[in-house]
Structure formats: structure tokens, C-alpha cells
Amino acid sequence: MKAKFKWSQPKLDEEISKGTRISIPTIKLSPSYEKLVYDKEVPPNLINSKVGVGTNENASAQLEALFGAKVFDFPKPPSLIKYLLGFSDDPDGIFMDFFAGSGATAQAVLEMNQQDGGSRKYICVQLDEQIAPATKAYQLGFRTISEITRKRLLLLHEKMQGQEETEAIDTGFRYFKLAPSRFKTWRGENSNGANEHAKQLTLFKQVEKQKEHSEHMLWELLLRSGIPLTAAINKVPAGDTMLYEVVEEGLLYGLDRINEEVLRKAIELKPKAFICPDSLFQLNEISRTNLQLTLQDIGIDFKSI
């Protein structure tokens, strides 16, 4: 039988003489120890069920019960994350996990809020890591680890919303994926002559991904403006199109088209500023100027981008 080496024999003999208990709690045969007395303000060396922390086996069983199948190998126990985050006394803190995996950190934060009524937030980041075709997760339709993370959060949201003690807890989340910009970038160094420069200026005003959803463009614009991803966004119908209202900032975005119905709705809402892309503006420059002056007269700043 082989196991991980941790102490020399003299050190082991010394600890045993002090009453230190040696155990092998998991099938990995990695020894752990538990002392009778610890120095003041120092957490125990053995993090186990005595401090409310489960094992990877416990975490696997819980995750399998949530999904109805085994979709992830060796997930971290949410109880371990809660134990570690518990050293922070900020009930409104923001906790970031750059290796989100199956989403254990997010679950831990939600459960901590459920227990003490806190309003902690989490930011989970996961690379676009592919799932092997031979796995059960792949057979169930998952293609990347981040898809499992997102599904876990959706299942937790549904589960916790059905619990009376969680009614006041915000279990919602937003999911973002890194993607190329929706706008053209200037390539002046590769253009020759006035005609090429004029062509570049025309392209620069156009949205790069015309068929992409307007919400993708909205979030890029908000990020470029320094507005946080947690900002409250209202979708406001205006005829056959949609406007986006950033309430706290007093901004209104029109990203699909500009017509009389859109302008009437913008005047009705009276935002601090009305913003739309140049490429979607269907009026000539004189009408644009008149529109800008009209909006300014009633206290609305007009910006075209």
C-alpha cells in the first residue's frame, strides 16, 4: 500500500505523543491530522466534517443529485468554499473565482446569503474548455465546462426560489461570453489614397455584426462607458422595435432603428441622454441637427456613436 508522504518518522512519533490523531479520510489515501490543542487564532489543520466541510465524494453526490447524472469529475464541496469565505466578515462582499468549474463558489455564496440574509455577490470565470465526447456530460448535450456552470446556477435558482427562506434572496445571475467587438476597427495603415480612406470612414460607422442581437451591442457600449454589468436594464417597446433604458444612469439606447415612434417614446421617457449608432440613423445631417436641438430644448442630450 502506498500513500502520500507528509512527515518524517521522528516528527510523526512526536505528534502522536502529543495526542495528534492521524487519519486517511478519502480513497486518495492522503493522510490528515487533527491536534488536541491549536495555537490561538489559528484554524485547525484538518478541515473536515467537524468544521462543517464535506469531501469531494460528498460534492460529487450532491452535484449528481442536482443534475440527475454525473456531469463533472471531482467538484469542490460548496461547504469548503463557505468555510474559507467565512473568514471574511463582509456580508455584502464580492467573491471572484477564476476557475469556476462546476460553479461551487457561486452555490456557496448563495447558501451563505440564505443562512444569514447577506447580499454577497460572486463573479465566476471559466475558460471555454471543451468536454470530451465519451463523457456522460457530452451525451447530455453539454459541450463546454461553462455550460455546466451555467446550468448548475439555473437549477439552483429554480430550487432556491421554491424555498420559503430564500424568497428575499436574489439568486439571479447574468451570463457573459467574451466575443469580438460589434464595431469596426480603424485600419488606416493598410489603406492607400483618398478613396480607401473614405471607404474606411464609411465602414467605421457600421456595426461589425449586423445580425447579432442588439443586447450584445448594448453591453459593449455600457462596458466602454464604465457602467457595471450589474446595472438594471429596462426593455421598452417602441412600435416594432425595442429601446433599452439604463435607469440609474438616466440613459436610453435605440439600437435597431430610428423612426417617429422611437423618438416619441424617447421624449415620453425623458432620459438624461438618448443614444443611437450612426449606422442606424436614417435621417440626413440637417434633420439630425434639428433633432438634437429639439431634444436639448426639453432637457435630453442626444448622442450618436
Image (spheres, grey):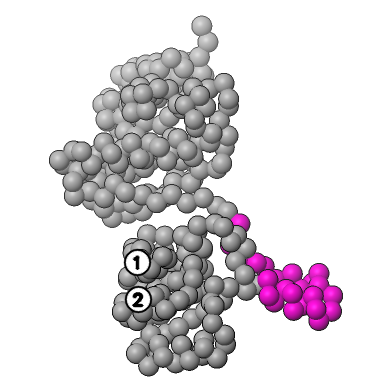
Give the mark nearer the N terminus: 1 vs 2.
Answer: 1
User: Do we see residue 244 in this rendering?
Assistant: no
- From the viewer's perspective, is 49 left or right of 245? left
For the residues labelled 1 and 2, the Cα–Cα distance comes to: 9 Å
- From the viewer's perspective, is 256 left or right of 298? right
Q: In the image, is residue 20 part of the stretch drawn in magenta?
A: no
- Determine crowd level at label 2: few under 14, some 14-19, many 20+ residues with C-alpha closer than 10 A: some
Which secondary structure, mark 2? helix
Q: Is residue 293 above or below residue 118?
A: below
Q: What residue is shown at x 26% (from left), y 36% (from top)?
A: 159
Q: In the image, is residue 181 part of the stretch drawn in magenta?
A: yes
**Which residue is under mark 2?**
265
Q: Is residue 299 above or below residue 58?
A: below
Q: Amino acid at mark 1?
A: Val
Going by the picture, which residue comes out furthest to the right? 192
Which residue is nearer to you in this view: 237 or 103? 237
Verify CB contact (< 8 Å) between mark 1 and mark 2.
yes
- From the viewer's perspective, is 133 left or right of 62? right
Q: Quadrant of the C terminus?
A: bottom right
- Residue 56 is situated, as x and y percent measured from the top left of the image, at 40, 25
Q: What residue is shown at x 74% (from left), y 69% (from top)?
A: 187
Question: What's drawn in magenta, residue-wise?
Answer: 180-203
Q: What residue is shown at x 33% (from left), y 51% (from top)?
A: 121
Q: What residue is shown at x 58% (from left), y 54% (from top)?
A: 179
Which residue is nearer to you in this view: 253 or 13? 253
- Residue 240 is situated, as x and y percent measured from the top left of the image, at 41, 65
**Which residue is under mark 1?**
236
